[in-house]
């Protein structure tokens, strides 16, 4: 059931490193793209063990609810199939991208490096039920190993993934499928499906409507852990985007935040005590714990989630960002690579890999993954060409690529020329930093107070002020930027120890060790270079 939760949390903005490509991948050259994926992800023909992808049923423009149900079935099935040891299962996001690009089975299998597919088809009957067909095929022979044709009510879809997992386990010689998980009551399941569809629209009002639906599901099925996790995420989204009436009562908002923290800690303890806890729930609670500076609690949740072979790509990517925020850059890269091997056609994964390689100073790998992200339809990853150009002193390219990336993200970019001018000419840096610091407050907020750009210009006082401003709120993915190789002057400044204290990281480092370049100075003070 938590397969649906991840989609809702991403729509609510609760997951760091979230997002989806804005266009389907290019179709002209699937083989060169497959070879690029093999090279960049370290894939080899002899992967060991079977690998499977599920092709969601093609959607229809006149029945978007049916398309949503098809995607939900894919997510639930892939989630259940990951419970089979010895089977690598590709993410639904990658198969949807391949379908959007019109790729056939052969091209899809080559890009995803799989040797089995599950075809699915869903149609609506005149009486409102669903006609479902599944076909497990072996590639490249296209031999059918098992097929299902049935008619069922929408709420009965939740029984299909277990049946599919049992058949896949038997047909591929993987032993027994895991025992069924606790399933929501049919009416509660329908509410959760509705919540997924509503939350996917993405507006704050939609998140609140989704929260109302989840509340109804919990009233029908009290204590359902998957719904409790979804409810916490949507409550967090509501706190991040308060109504005018809520904003007018700060005391009540603080009380809601305190209650959310208490409920998150309680649910985290329940999940840790549950030997079968879904790793998605653990990672989602870890993310919230880090936002609240409960680093040790968050990483304890990650310790339980990460070894679980059921873990999904989005959770791995979130865990990667959490490690990068703590300064553990090599571990972040390893987790991002694991996520991308499961979801290789998701541009967001390649943008994340470009970022982590940039943090480690590997320009070649940074450019490689940024290029793949662009080929998969991402319009923001071009900013990494700008970073490479900044590092190389190619100022015209730095400006052009940065502007293009910001335009793709829908962010104002009139200030970029001043920034690049300051990066190119030390005599212009004060003017550039002052111009950036004077930009409108909404833009400042959206760009995390431009801390990265001020640090790149070497304006340590303004960069520290920007970082401290960011630390007035919950911890966010922006904190990874503290560890860019170019920012050693910032890290060695007198004010950085106070920054570290305000992040809460010293508590984590005291328990688990500091990242390379940081040392305990005693008395709770840490120094980084």
Image: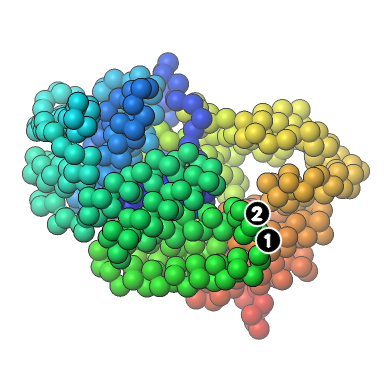
The quadrant holding residue 116 is top left
What residue do we see at 25% from left, 50% from top?
187
On screen, residue 61 versus residue 522, left or right, reads: left
| 108 relative position to 18: left or right | left
Q: Which mark is residue 248?
A: 1
- Residue 112 visible in the displayed image: no
Instruction: Please tell me whether residue 48 is drawn above or below residue 301 in the rendered image.
Output: above
- Which residue appears at 66% of the width and 30% of the height? 407
Q: Nearer the viewer, residue 201 or 520?
A: 201
Establish if 379 lies above or below 474.
Answer: above
Q: Residue furthest top?
A: 28
Q: Residue furthest bottom?
A: 523
Q: Residue at x 32, y 61 (%)?
A: 219
Task: Tell whether label 1 touches label 2 (CB within 8 Å).
Answer: yes
Residue 326, image x and y in percent? 55, 62
Which label sits on residue 244?
Answer: 2
Q: Of helix, strand and loop, which one carries label 2? A: helix
Q: Position of residue 304 (x, y in %)?
A: 34, 65
Who is closer to the viewer here, 201 or 3? Answer: 201
Percent coordinates x, y for residue 177 in the rendering: 13, 51
Which is nearer the eye, 492 or 191?
Answer: 191
**Residue 399 placement: quadrant:** top right
Neighbourhood count class around disc 2 (C-alpha, 10 Å): few under 14, some 14–19, many 20 upward = few
Figure quadrant of the C terminus: bottom right
């Amino acid at each position: 059931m938590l397969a649906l939760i991840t989609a809702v949390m991403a729509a609510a903005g609760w997951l760091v490193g979230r997002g989806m490509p804005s266009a389907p991948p290019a179709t002209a050259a699937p083989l060169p793209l497959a070879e690029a994926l093999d090279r960049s992800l370290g894939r080899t023909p002899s992967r060991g063990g079977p690998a499977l992808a599920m092709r969601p049923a093609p959607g229809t423009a006149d029945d978007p609810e049916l398309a949503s149900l098809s995607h939900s079935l894919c997510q639930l099935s892939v989630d259940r199939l990951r419970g089979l040891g010895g089977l690598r299962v590709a993410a639904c996001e990658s198969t949807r991208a391949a379908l959007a690009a019109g790729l056939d089975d052969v091209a899809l299998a080559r890009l995803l490096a799989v040797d089995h597919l599950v075809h699915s088809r869903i149609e609506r009957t005149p009486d409102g039920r669903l006609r479902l067909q599944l076909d497990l095929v072996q590639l490249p022979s296209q031999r059918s190993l098992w097929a299902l044709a049935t008619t069922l009510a929408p709420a009965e879809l939740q029984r299909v993934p277990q049946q599919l997992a049992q058949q896949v386990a038997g047909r591929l010689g993987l032993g027994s499928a895991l025992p069924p998980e606790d399933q929501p009551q049919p009416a509660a399941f329908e509410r959760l499906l509705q919540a997924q569809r509503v939350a996917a629209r993405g507006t704050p009002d939609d998140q609140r409507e989704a929260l109302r639906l989840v509340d109804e599901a919990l009233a029908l099925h009290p204590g359902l852990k998957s719904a409790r996790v979804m409810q916490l995420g949507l409550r967090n989204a509501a706190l991040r985007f308060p109504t005018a009436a809520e904003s007018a009562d700060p005391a009540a908002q603080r009380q809601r935040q305190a209650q959310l923290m208490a409920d998150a800690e309680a649910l985290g303890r329940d999940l840790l005590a549950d030997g079968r806890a879904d790793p998605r729930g653990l990672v989602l609670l870890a993310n919230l714990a880090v936002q609240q500076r409960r680093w040790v609690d968050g990483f304890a949740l990650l310790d339980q989630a990460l070894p679980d072979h059921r873990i999904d790509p989005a959770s791995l990517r979130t865990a990667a960002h959490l490690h990068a925020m703590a300064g553990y850059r090599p571990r972040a890269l390893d987790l991002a690579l694991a996520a991308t091997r499961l979801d290789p056609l998701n541009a967001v994964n390649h943008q994340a890999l470009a970022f982590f390689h940039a943090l480690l100073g590997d320009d070649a790998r940074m450019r490689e993954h940024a290029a793949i992200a662009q080929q998969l339809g991402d319009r923001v990853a071009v900013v990494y060409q700008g970073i490479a150009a900044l590092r190389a002193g190619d100022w015209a390219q730095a400006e052009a690529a940065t502007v293009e990336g910001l335009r793709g993200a829908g962010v104002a970019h009139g200030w970029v020329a001043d920034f690049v001018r300051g990066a190119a000419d030390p005599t212009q840096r004060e003017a550039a930093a002052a111009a950036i610091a004077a930009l409108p407050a909404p833009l400042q907020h959206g760009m995390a107070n431009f801390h990265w750009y001020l640090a790149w210009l070497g304006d340590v006082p303004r960069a520290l002020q920007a970082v401290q401003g960011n630390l007035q709120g919950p911890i966010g993915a922006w904190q990874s930027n503290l560890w860019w190789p170019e920012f050693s002057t910032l890290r060695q400044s007198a004010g950085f120890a106070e920054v570290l204290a305000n992040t809460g990281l010293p508590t984590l480092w005291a328990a688990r060790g500091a990242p390379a370049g940081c040392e305990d100075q005693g008395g709770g003070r840490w120094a980084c270079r």
